[in-house]
Image (cartoon, helix red, strand yellow):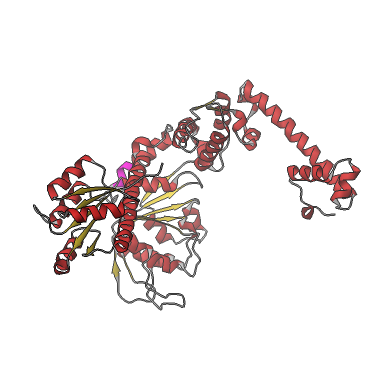
Amino acid sequence: MSYTPTILVVDDEEKIQKLLKLNLRHDYKVVVSGSVSDAMNHLQNASIDLVLTDLKLPDEDGIALLQKVKAFDSSIPVVLMTAYGTVENAVEAMKLGAYDYLLKPVKMKEMVVTIQKALSYRFLLTENIQLKRELEGIYNFKNVVCASPQMRKIMDLVRQVADTKATVLIQGETGTGKELIAKMIHLSSDRSSRSFIPINCSAIPDDLIESEFFGHEKGAFTSAVAQKKGKFELAHGGTLFLDEISEMPTSLQPKLLRVLEDQCFTRVGGVVPIQVDVRIIAASNRNLKNDVELGRFRKDLYYRLNVISIKIPPLRERKEDIAPLVGFFIKKHSGDTHGKICGISSGAMSILENYNWPGNVRELENVILRAMVLAKDGRIEIDHLPDELMGIAPLNIMNKEALKLAKKKAKQKAAMEIEKRFVVNALKRSGGNISRAAREISMDRRQFQAMMKRCGIRLKDLKI
């Protein structure tokens, strides 16, 4: 059942109340009131999504009601209705937080459009508030999964540096959680109410990267049809996360160094210096010190970034974290799989704990989500894990259940290899003619094509 928004109409004229209720009743639940005091009673005792109020009311005016509504719940939009002579008051109300105002006599089409826009704003604002709360929960220290001594030490360091303005350099393999650590630092700092702006230095073309960082003025280059703020301006008062900093072109590195030192820059094509207050957190999946020694990264920029160094170990070096991470991911994705999975078998856990995890935590999460989709009986079993995990798990530490499945999968793999060779040989004998190949092995064409598809064989890949 779809949700029906509730509109509180506040007007001391009964005919206006009836008119609005009549016109809005098909799409909204309408509650009417004739005074500020009565309106506040409705607000405190019902779930109101929008307030539509006259400016002139018997006890207090619409501006007083606006202030009370905003004090009660700032996300509820207030739309004022006013006569021509009080437009200045309505404009003043806009400055105090009113969403919009309508001139009397109100045109219903105009009112409906305004209500729709105001409610869209309300629901978007509510979603953003909820999302922020969820993000704060995800990146809360209490919810971070770390059983290993290495990760506990990193969490202690994150707590220490969060409230400082010190530049942080996070290094670790792809998938270890570098951006998660960066967000934790931001959300635990006194900058948490301001923007966290990520920028992937490897994903921007060289000819656009300076504009992305510093913005540009209209006409600065052919496609600059309007002024644009760069990431540094957007991150003012907050945090700028420079992901894959090792991929930054050497031509931009000295300009970045200057901005880090002065917190001042000019847009591309501009002449006016722009001062900002930005905290820098950088990340790299390569060892930046090695890049400095190889001449791929400026030494002075490296030392400017490496004030606080955080090195995240790969998952294979902190196996203690695998079991708690599995539990965390099962809980995290329970909504996506209708909460049907509540645990994992010891055999499946043994496979996970003895896999090398080249994709680190990100790969583990994807494996768990896949297994949760495939599992049906409330528990993840070995059958629900990808084949590549079985091939790497060492037999001498797998239990009986895991060994049994490994043998089964090995037989399946061998059978598939035989089938693949059989199909390829038939195609080669027929000169690549599928119909002739099928006839020669006593199969119909569709069966043979299905076998080709199952084996992953395409004619264009064969040298026939």
Q: In this view, does 390 lie above or below 229?
A: above
Write the start and end of the magenta stretch as one range: 158-162
Q: Is residue 403 above or below residue 182?
A: above
Residue in view at x 77 percent, y 34 percent: 415
Q: In which quarter of the image is residue 271?
A: bottom left
Q: Quadrant of residue 419?
A: top right
* Nearer to us in this view, 133 or 99: 99
Is residue 404 among the parts visible in the rendering? Answer: yes
| Predominant SS of the magenta segment | helix
Q: What is the number of callouts on the image?
A: 0
Is residue 194 among the parts visible in the rendering? Answer: no
Left or right relative to 340: residue 450: right
Left or right relative to 406: residue 95: left
Residue 435, position as x, y percentages in the image: 86, 49
Residue 321, position as x, y percentages in the image: 46, 33
Residue extending furthest left?
59
Left or right relative to 16: residue 269: right
* Nearer to us in this view, 112 or 229: 112
Residue in view at x 9 percent, y 54 percent: 58
Q: Quadrant of the C terminus?
A: bottom right
Assess whether residue 18 is covered by the magenta stretch: no
Residue 369, position as x, y percentages in the image: 52, 38
Q: In which quarter of the image is the N terminus?
A: top left
Residue in view at x 45 percent, y 44 percent: 177
Q: In which quarter of the image is residue 450?
A: top right
Q: In this view, does 100 lie above or below 411?
A: below
* Nearer to us in this view, 121 or 277: 121
